[in-house]
Structure formats: structure tokens, C-alpha cells
């Protein structure tokens, strides 16, 4: 096998193009990584087939067996070569060397190549302060967004909330939402969220997931206009009726969102919370009616009939009385 591979490598220089093509196929079929450097003359070949095969050989074998060839490829300045290098960063074990390669690509004319180079420097935490500043002020929103994802400076992230591109604003908000902010920074963030519908919808699930103290601020900002979204977000994040996040919302008077989260739930914890809400004067009569309507299938249970009877005796709200009467007589 070794002899046949060496023979094929030698034939890469054969005058007969058919012999060269056959040699290329043999080397690829044999996965002959030791042949990678022998493909370098093909990088400038007039025949596009040979050029493509040389790039494929570099992509397949150079990262592990001849990484120095990638540096030569990046320096040549040819787009196909630069794209090849940008695609193999994850296959290079030495992150310091991958950073060297990434820097060679920062001035490429291909924005995708530059983005990959930037992300490699950022993900390996090897970007210099000068490079970080360059990335933050890039004309490319993808690069600005990537820079915001690793930027620990709260003042910079607050400034990114004003960026003209929504992806940068979203990334900055995502970073800020999990940080502990002082009063002024939190106010600036809340103002931005309230005035940007997309950012607000991004913030609510994050606030629920991390039980952030500004959850109430977010809910109160749009609890009437975005009630359906809030209820859905609550259902996705909260699964037990004794979850402290529900109590936080109730304490803040966000009873409608909690009541609508509760609709259709029939476990013991939910029953207890439902009973509290049905006799809570802060809860809207429509929400109480909806809670009662969803109990019709349980109207034979003594506890349910007792609730209906108590409402009939104590409530003065016509909507609630009608729903309680339907439940009691069903």
C-alpha cells in the first residue's frame, strides 16, 4: 500500500493529465494524508478540477497532519484558499495557531471568511484589546453582535442597545439580562425593552428562566397588550402552582396573567391556588368566569360544588354568579 501511495504521489507530476487525474483519485480513495503537501502545485493550476482537488486535500488532511500548509494557503490571498482555512478552525488542536490563521483572514474580501475568523478569535478568548475594539465598531452587524456576546462592559452593552441592527440589540440585551445591574443601568435596560417589542419578547423568557427581579417590571409594562404572549411564556417556564415566580406576580397585582396560566390545570396545588384567586377581589370577573367554566367536567366533586355554592352566596358580580350557577347546576 505504501509503495502504491508513493507511486501515486510521484504521478501527480506526470506530463499526461490522465495519469495525474488517476493519481489524485488513488490518493483520495486511500485517504493518503501524507500526500497533502504534494498537492500544493495544483493550487495555481489552470485546470479548475485540479485546483478544487488541492483545496479539498488541504481541507481534509492539513489541519491534523500539516497545519503549516494552511498558513501558506491563507497568505496566498486566494478566496478559495481563505474559505478552506476558515472552514477548518475547529479541526486545529492548537488554538494559538488557529488564532494566527484567523488573523491572516481578517482582511479578506469575503465577509463570511472574516466572520469566521472573528468568531474563532472570540471563542478562544485570544483576541487582543485592539482587535476587540475593531470588532465592536465593525461595519458588519454579525461581527458587532459577536463582539457584544463576549463584552463584559455594561456601558458598552447599553450602547449596543441603540445599534441600528436588531441582532446586535438582541445580543446586547441577552448579555445584560443575566447581569446584576445597578439602578441606573437597569433603568436604561428597562426603557430599551419597553420601547422595542422584539427585545421585550426576548427579555420575558430570560427573566422567567433566571427569576430576575425585573420580571414584574416587564410584565407590568405590557400585561394588557401582550397578555397572550405573557401567559404562554409563563406556561413554558412554570410548571407548579406553588412556584415562587407566580407569587411574585400575584404580589405585584399581575393576577390576570397568573389566572390564565392556571386555566385547565387540575392538580392539588393548582386547585389550592385557584380557590385563592376565585375569592381574591383583585382578580377580574372574566378571569374568574374562565376558571369556573373549565371546572364543568368536575362538577360532581364535592369540593367543586362547595366552591360554586360559596361564590353564589358571597359574590355580587353578575358574571361570576352566572358562571358559578352554571357550574353548580350542571
Image (cartoon, helix red, strand yellow):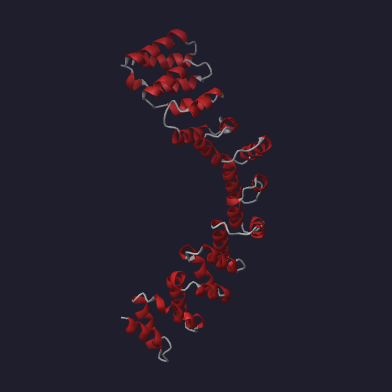
Quick one: 289 or 162, which is closer to the camera? 162
Residue at x 32% of width, y 16% of height: 301
Q: Is residue 316 above or below residue 111?
A: above
Instruction: Give coordinates of residue 190: x percent, y percent.
Output: 63, 37
Instruction: Determine which quarter of the picture holds residue 251.
Output: top right
Considering every residue shown, the one lying at the far bottom of the view is 15
Instruction: Determine which quarter of the picture holds residue 56.
Output: bottom left
Residue at x 44% of width, y 69% of height: 64
Instruction: Give coordinates of residue 47: x percent, y percent.
Output: 47, 83
Considering every residue shown, the one lying at the far top of the view is 313
Quadrant showing the C terminus: top left
Quadrant showing the N terminus: bottom left
Q: Is residue 112 above or below residue 299?
A: below
Instruction: Give coordinates of residue 68: x percent, y percent.
Output: 51, 74
Instruction: Give coordinates of residue 192: x percent, y percent.
Output: 64, 40
Q: How many marks on residues?
A: 0
Quick one: 58 or 321, which is closer to the camera? 58
In the image, is 311 to the left or to the right of 98? Answer: left
Amino acid at each position: 500500500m505504501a509503495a502504491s501511495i508513493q507511486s501515486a504521489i510521484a504521478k501527480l507530476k506526470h506530463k499526461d493529465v490522465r495519469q495525474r487525474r488517476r493519481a489524485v483519485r488513488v490518493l483520495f480513495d486511500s485517504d493518503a494524508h501524507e500526500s497533502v503537501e504534494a498537492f500544493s502545485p495544483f493550487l495555481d493550476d489552470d485546470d479548475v478540477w485540479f485546483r478544487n482537488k488541492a483545496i479539498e486535500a488541504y481541507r481534509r488532511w492539513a489541519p491534523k497532519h500539516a497545519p503549516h500548509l494552511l498558513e501558506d494557503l491563507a497568505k496566498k490571498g486566494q478566496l478559495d484558499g481563505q474559505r478552506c482555512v476558515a472552514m477548518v478552525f475547529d479541526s486545529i488542536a492548537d488554538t494559538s495557531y488557529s488564532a494566527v490563521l484567523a488573523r491572516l483572514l481578517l482582511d479578506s474580501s469575503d465577509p463570511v471568511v472574516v466572520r469566521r475568523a472573528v468568531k474563532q478569535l472570540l471563542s478562544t478568548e485570544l483576541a487582543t484589546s485592539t482587535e476587540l475594539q475593531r470588532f465592536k465598531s465593525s461595519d458588519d452587524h454579525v461581527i458587532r453582535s459577536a463582539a457584544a456576546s463576549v463584552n463584559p462592559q455594561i456601558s458598552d452593552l447599553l450602547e449596543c442597545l441603540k445599534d441600528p441592527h436588531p441582532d446586535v440589540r438582541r445580543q446586547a440585551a441577552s448579555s445584560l439580562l443575566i447581569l446584576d445591574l445597578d439602578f441606573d443601568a437597569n433603568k436604561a435596560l428597562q426603557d430599551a425593552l419597553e420601547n422595542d417589542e422584539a427585545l421585550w419578547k426576548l427579555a420575558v423568557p430570560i427573566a422567567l428562566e433566571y427569576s430576575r427581579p425585573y420580571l414584574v417590571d416587564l410584565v407590568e409594562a405590557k400585561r394588557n397588550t401582550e397578555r397572550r404572549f405573557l401567559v404562554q411564556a409563563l406556561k413554558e417556564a412554570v410548571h407548579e402552582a406553588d412556584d415562587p415566580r407566580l407569587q411574585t406576580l400575584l404580589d405585584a397585582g399581575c393576577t390576570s396573567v397568573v389566572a390564565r396560566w392556571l386555566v385547565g390545570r387540575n392538580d392539588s396545588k393548582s386547585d389550592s391556588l385557584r380557590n385563592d384567586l376565585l375569592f381574591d377581589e383583585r382578580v377580574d370577573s372574566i378571569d374568574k368566569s374562565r376558571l369556573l367554566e373549565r371546572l364543568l367536567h368536575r362538577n360532581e366533586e364535592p369540593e367543586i360544588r362547595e366552591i360554586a355554592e360559596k361564590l353564589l352566596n358571597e359574590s355580587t358580580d353578575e358574571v361570576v354568579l352566572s358562571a358559578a350557577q352554571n357550574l353548580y347546576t350542571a
